[in-house]
Image: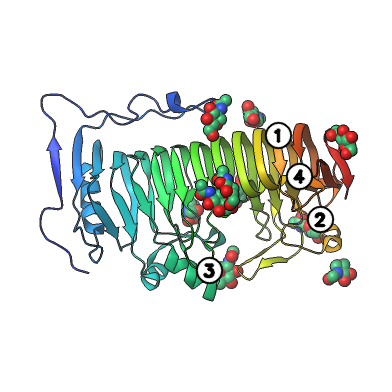
């Protein structure tokens, strides 16, 4: 790929004290609702300069250098604009963890190159579940908005994954070590894997994310989670539309103070805690999570908690684990609408282990407590009819205070049965008829 030496961006300094107001220059908190964040989000500083990112305008040239230089030029108080009439191509892994007090206004389209060899060798590795990202965006007080598009060029990855499940498919959007920020509105398309990883981050608001991208070959787009939070605290995800084929949102180890509200999810695996307890001897904590006002369509689950048992288990060739420690606590799912969803509620401490006898012999060392499912409405799919929900603990000693109330969910045949195992059924206002 060739690079141009010419000036990489244009900086406009604004005249006589006039300032460009940051998109959220006053308070991020005003944008959060109807539920309030667990802790107030920090305000964003005013932006005073504007840099426009140049583009070669040709997908065979890499625009990464243009992007980096604009970001460096407008860091510390500026706004970087990806113009509406431009197409940008990124063929280089970008470490954007140096950002501070900066806005990225993405109006145009950014596409990642389909060079699977390059990305497998150079994308950022995050050890957890072998996750890799095209770029890592972090720092302090960073807003990314504009309604433009990030396109992961996923088709080549969906096809390659079908041949070899051990390839490392990059995550489209890596928010790594970001403290204070707003992401959205943005369109995310064709991610090779998860759409967004939020790791080592605090006080980040995702608002107005539009996710979609289906495979056009017979090889499905797999593991396309909307969000995965990891080692992150005080995160808000709201007002977004997700069309994908795996978790809509997933809370991975050490996620706490997470508010998720006003989502429309279609085709997903629901809003999931976990999977947790995958790594032997490691301590995974997920606590203080509120999921509110979600519409879930054509999905395997609405509310899901998945914990690996105390024994080694294999979900698939590239997903194995069990034996981890930790706790899931203070999790609430409130005001959930479902249509054509296999399970309204699915709690399992036997994730990845099909042999339930074996699971009960080696109960999970990861406890589940203080969980509230309330105000569920709608109809499941016929997949598990007559059952509409399942709460399976590996031992009564490791599950406590799991409540279900006002669950107005029926199967297509009109039943509302639940599978309940090793759980206090007196707290579940549902029909525990099997298990
Ligand atoms: C997060 O921070 C830890 C500790 O500094 C580091 O080991 C890890 O690589 C960082 N990134 C992720 C994705 O966890
Ligand atoms: C990471 O990938 C390797 C093979 O590339 C595999 O052996 C290992 O189990 C994977 N780790 C996890 C946690 O999935
Ligand atoms: C998660 O938090 C627990 C408890 O603080 C800690 O022991 C563990 O190392 C953390 N795990 C990760 C992956 O950061
Ligand atoms: C629930 O979310 C939908 C968007 O999915 C939104 O239109 C509606 O206003 C929200 N309801 C409340 C009470 O906020
Ligand atoms: C919703 O998901 C189904 C797959 O479950 C898919 O066929 C359909 O196109 C999706 N709808 C939209 C609007 O993307
Ligand atoms: C538990 O979560 C709720 C939100 O559902 C929150 O209001 C409460 O403060 C949390 N409890 C603790 C101890 O943080
Ligand atoms: C659910 O899937 C059906 C069939 O694929 C589709 O017609 C419908 O639009 C989907 N629902 C949503 C909300 O996308
Ligand atoms: C399930 O595990 C039990 C206990 O270890 C074992 O006796 C049984 O053979 C296993 N069943 C299958 C189908 O593997
Ligand atoms: C974890 O659970 C297994 C099986 O239930 C048990 O044998 C083991 O001692 C536990 N490990 C720890 C560290 O608690
Ligand atoms: C349980 O199922 C029976 C028969 O299907 C039904 O009459 C009853 O109302 C159900 N109970 C609850 C709490 O939904």
Q: Position of residue 234 (x, y in %)?
A: 52, 35
Q: Position of residue 20 (x, y in %)?
A: 22, 29
Sort mark 4 into few (<14), some (14-19) or many (20+) by Cα contacts within 10 Å.
some
Q: Is residue 138 left or right of residue 271?
A: left
Residue nearest the observer in this picture, 211 or 166: 211
Residue depth check, mark 2 versus mark 3: number of the one nearer the observer: 3
Q: Which residue is mark 3?
A: 218
- Is the CB of mark 2 within 8 Å of ligand 9? yes
**Mark 3 residue element:** loop
Sort mark 2 into few (<14), some (14-19) or many (20+) by Cα contacts within 10 Å.
many
Residue depth check, mark 1 versus mark 4: number of the one nearer the observer: 4
Q: Which residue is mark 4?
A: 412
The Cα atoms of the two marked residues, 4 and 3, are separated by 29 Å
Q: Which residue is mark 2?
A: 363
Give the mark nearer the N terminus: 2 vs 3: 3
Residue at the image point whose x is 63% and y is 43% from the top = 286
Residue depth check, mark 2 versus mark 1: number of the one nearer the observer: 1
Residue at the image point whose x is 25% and y is 54% from the top = 87
Residue depth check, mark 1 versus mark 3: number of the one nearer the observer: 3
Residue at the image point whose x is 67% and y is 34% from the top = 332
**Mark 4 residue element:** loop
Q: Position of residue 323 (x, y in %)?
A: 72, 59
């Amino acid at each position: 790929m060739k690079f141009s030496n010419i000036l990489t961006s244009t900086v406009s300094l604004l005249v006589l004290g006039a300032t460009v107001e940051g998109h959220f220059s006053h308070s991020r908190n005003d944008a959060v609702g109807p539920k309030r964040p667990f802790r107030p989000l920090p305000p964003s500083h005013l932006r005073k300069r504007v840099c426009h990112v140049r583009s070669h305008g040709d997908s065979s040239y890499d625009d990464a250098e243009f992007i980096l230089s604009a970001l460096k030029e407008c860091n510390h108080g500026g706004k970087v604009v990806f113009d509406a009439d431009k197409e940008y191509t990124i063929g280089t892994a970008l470490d954007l963890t140096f950002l501070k007090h900066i806005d990225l206004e993405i109006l145009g389209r950014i596409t990642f190159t389909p060079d699977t060899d390059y990305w497998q060798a150079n994308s950022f590795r995050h050890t957890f579940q072998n996750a890799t990202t095209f770029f890592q965006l972090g720092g302090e007080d960073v807003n990314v908005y504009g309604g433009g598009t990030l396109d992961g060029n996923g088709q080549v990855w969906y096809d390659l994954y079908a041949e070899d499940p051990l390839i490392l498919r990059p995550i489209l959007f890596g928010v790594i070590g970001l403290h204070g920020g707003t992401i959205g509105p943005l369109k995310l398309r064709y991610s090779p894997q998860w759409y967004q990883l939020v790791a080592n981050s605090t006080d980040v608001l995702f608002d107005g994310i539009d996710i979609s991208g289906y495979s056009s070959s017979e090889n499905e787009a797999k593991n396309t989670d909307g969000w995965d939070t990891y080692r992150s605290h005080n995160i808000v995800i709201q007002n977004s539309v997700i069309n994908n084929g795996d978790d809509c949102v997933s809370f991975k180890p050490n996620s706490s103070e997470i508010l998720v509200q006003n989502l429309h999810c279609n085709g997903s695996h629901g809003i999931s805690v976990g999977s947790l307890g995958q790594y032997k001897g490691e301590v995974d904590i997920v606590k203080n999570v509120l999921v509110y006002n979600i519409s879930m369509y054509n999905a395997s689950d609405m509310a899901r908690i998945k914990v690996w048992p105390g024994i080694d288990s294999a979900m698939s060739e590239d997903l194995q684990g069990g034996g981890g420690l930790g706790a899931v606590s203070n999790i609430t799912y409130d005001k959930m609408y479902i249509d054509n969803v296999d399970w309204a509620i699915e709690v399992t401490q036997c994730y990845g282990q099909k042999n339930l006898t074996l699971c009960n012999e080696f109960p999970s060392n990861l406890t589940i407590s203080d969980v509230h499912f309330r105000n569920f409405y709608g109809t499941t799919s016929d997949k598990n009819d007559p059952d509409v929900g399942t709460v399976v603990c590996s031992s009564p000693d490791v599950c406590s205070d799991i409540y279900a109330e006002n669950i107005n969910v029926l199967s297509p045949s009109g039943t509302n049965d639940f599978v309940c195992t090793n759980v206090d059924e007196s707290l579940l206002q549902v029909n525990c008829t099997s298990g």
